[in-house]
Image (cartoon, rainbow, N blue to C red):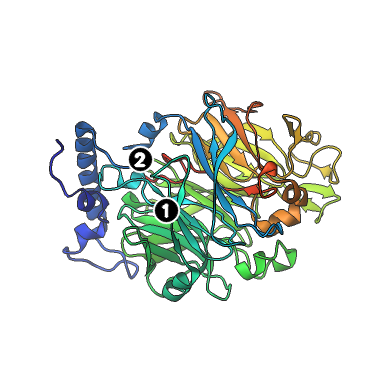
């Protein structure tokens, strides 16, 4: 039998729990001299307890380390939100369960659909109630999927534990509770915390003005507790976030002001502080905003990823409108900095909305061994694989076009291209023409399969890919060469959301029931 331990305290207490009784000295108004020591004690305690957990065969959710996760089982199911918002069907968005087990008779099929309770929610990203941040806490289970609604600000809590193949509704957090307790709307990214809480980033106040706050939810009662950040520290915009407790840091990003981008992309909104430009650096212990890193006017830094190694002080962020990747890192003096390490050149075109077409880097992820960075260029239509063994100098090792706007014979003619000699062929798979470009991406734990869907956000889908809205999006599987680099479409894999019961749907972010490289954080 395992030893009698208060796992929830020892595993999930924040570093501040070790530091509250120690003398402190202000640094930049909110840091303390004891934080570093507290984190070292906290990390050492975690390591010892995790070793005990492994020895006694009980470990709670997730994996002890990212490399342990790479040795985990092959994915068999994927949960993906399917969007009917804006289609005129008057049907709610839903959570689809997709069978991705090649040994299953239902391979590449949607085997279950869980409808939400209202129409026009605009489901977007999803997250878990527990992940590897609470590995070793046997009282925790990864059995609730959190689905914030970008359009309605409603937050759905879905029970995946009772039946993995047929999730069911567990609870709904209504927008009014979020408004009254947080004065926030447009909830976006959700991450589970080591404390057992769930935190959701938000993009706006109740009037649609930019406001980068964080909604904190109690996972015992599933009630909104309030905001995570210190009052008055809200940045002007929000989007994604990632935390790295061993460096006492969280970094969040900025998309833009929702009351403008919710109507589609308008170049008149540029150079008016309506799109994001900052990485916002937070003290993880005190919840204070301690630094802002400018990555360029209207760059719109969206998806942010630390390296998975919890000791690492490096990460990557994708800047959508700038079509670039910035490497951020901790400096010798303890501050944080960012440098552009990848720039996707615009293509000069005719027959499009504007004379130049950006790549539009809308999603990125990092393999669990921290070796490869993957990104999607939603408008150009390609997926890219970079070796980031040296994060200061990524090397392109794989590229694959699976859609986009620059295909041969289309409305767009490329006049000048710094990368390609000719326009790519229209993308076809199993006799189906794919409209839209690669957008959300998810990697198998072993790094050998990359999944992609093609929908971004209803107003922008309608603007840039109206044919996809009419015909539905797809999910594709890309085979990955993890030795030398390289990407290749799996011709046997296609999930066509154009054939759904309530009409063509658009699939967005993907989650495995057992966790993945964009939801699990190690502390």
Q: Check disc 2 and report its element: helix, strand or loop.
A: loop
Residue 363 in percent (x, y) is at: 58, 47
Q: Residue furthest front?
A: 501
Residue at horizontal 73 percent and vertical 37 percent from the top? 419
Residue shown at 26% from the left, 54% from the top = 36
Residue 38 against residue 292 in the figure, above or below: above
Q: Write down the residue under mark 1.
A: 191
The numbered mark at residue 455 is: none
Residue 142 falls in which quadrant of the image?
A: top left
Task: Check the image and report above or below for 91 versus 161.
Answer: below
Q: Is residue 439 left or right of residue 173?
A: right
Residues at circles 1 and 2 in contact by the CB criterion of under 8 Å = no
Which of 430 and 164 lies nearest the eye of the viewer? Answer: 164
- The numbered dot on residue 62 is 2
In this rendering, the answer to whether 447 lies above or below 282 is above
Find residue 280 and report its horizontal and vertical position in percent: 47, 61
Q: Position of residue 297 (x, y in %)?
A: 62, 62
**In the rendered view, does 210 fall on the left or right side of 159?**
right
Q: Secondary structure at mark 1?
A: strand
Q: Is residue 129 visible?
A: yes
* As drawn, 100 above or below 219: above
**Structural crowding at the residue carrying mark 2, measured as other residues with C-alpha within 10 Å and reported as few (<14), some (14–19) or many (≥20):** many
Res. 124 image quadrant:
bottom right
Q: Quadrant of the N terminus?
A: top left
* Quadrant in the rendering for residue 270: bottom right
> Closest to the observer: 114 or 19?
114
């Amino acid at each position: 039998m395992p030893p009698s331990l208060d796992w929830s305290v020892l595993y999930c207490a924040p570093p501040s729990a070790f530091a509250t009784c120690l003398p402190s000295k202000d640094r930049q108004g909110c840091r303390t001299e004891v934080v570093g020591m507290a984190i070292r004690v906290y990390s050492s305690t975690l390591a010892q307890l995790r070793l005990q957990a492994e020895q006694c065969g009980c470990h709670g959710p997730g994996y002890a380390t990212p490399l342990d996760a790479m040795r985990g089982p092959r994915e068999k199911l994927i949960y993906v939100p399917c969007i009917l918002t804006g289609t005129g069907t008057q049907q709610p968005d839903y959570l689809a369960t997709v069978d991705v087990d090649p040994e299953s008779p239902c391979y590449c099929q949607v085997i279950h659909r869980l409808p939400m309770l209202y129409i026009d929610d605009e489901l977007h990203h999803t997250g878990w109630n527990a992940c590897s941040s609470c590995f070793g806490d046997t009282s925790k289970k990864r059995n609730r999927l959190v689905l914030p609604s970008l359009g309605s600000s409603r937050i759905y809590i879905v029970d995946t534990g009772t039946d993995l193949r047929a999730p069911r509704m567990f609870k709904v957090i209504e927008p009014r509770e979020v408004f009254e307790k947080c004065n926030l709307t447009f909830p976006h990214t959700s991450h589970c915390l080591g404390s057992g809480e769930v935190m959701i980033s938000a993009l706006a106040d109740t009037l649609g003005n930019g406001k980068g706050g964080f909604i904190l939810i109690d996972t015992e009662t599933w009630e909104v507790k309030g905001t995570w950040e210190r009052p008055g520290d809200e940045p002007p915009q929000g989007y994604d976030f990632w935390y790295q407790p061993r460096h006492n840091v969280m970094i969040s990003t900025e998309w833009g002001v929702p009351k403008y981008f919710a109507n589609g992309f308008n170049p008149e909104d540029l150079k008016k502080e309506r799109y994001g430009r900052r990485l916002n650096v937070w003290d993880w212990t005190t919840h204070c905003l301690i630094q802002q890193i400018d990555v360029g006017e209207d760059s719109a830094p969206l998806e942010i990823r630390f390296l998975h190694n919890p000791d690492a002080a490096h990460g990557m962020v994708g800047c959508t409108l700038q079509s670039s990747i910035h490497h951020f890192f901790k400096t010798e003096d303890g501050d944080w900095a960012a440098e552009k390490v990848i720039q996707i050149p615009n293509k000069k075109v005719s027959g499009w909305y504007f004379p130049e077409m950006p790549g539009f880097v809308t999603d990125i992820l990092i393999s669990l061994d921290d070796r490869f960075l993957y990104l999607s260029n939603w408008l150009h239509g390609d997926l890219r694989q970079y070796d980031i063994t040296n994060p200061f100098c990524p090397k392109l090792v794989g590229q694959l076009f699976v859609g986009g706007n620059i295909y041969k014979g289309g409305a767009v003619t490329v006049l000048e291209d710094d990368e390609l000699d000719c326009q790519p062929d229209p993308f076809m798979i199993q006799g189906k023409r794919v409209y839209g470009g690669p957008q959300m991406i998810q990697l198998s734990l072993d790094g050998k399969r990359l999944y992609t869907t093609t929908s971004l956000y209803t107003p922008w889908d309608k603007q840039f890919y109206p044919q996809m809205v009419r015909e539905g999006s797809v999910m594709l599987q890309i085979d990955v060469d993890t030795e030398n680099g390289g990407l290749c479409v799996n011709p046997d894999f296609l999930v066509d959301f154009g054939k759904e019961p309530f009409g063509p749907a658009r699939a967005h972010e993907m989650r495995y029931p057992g966790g993945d490289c964009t939801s699990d954080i190690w502390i």
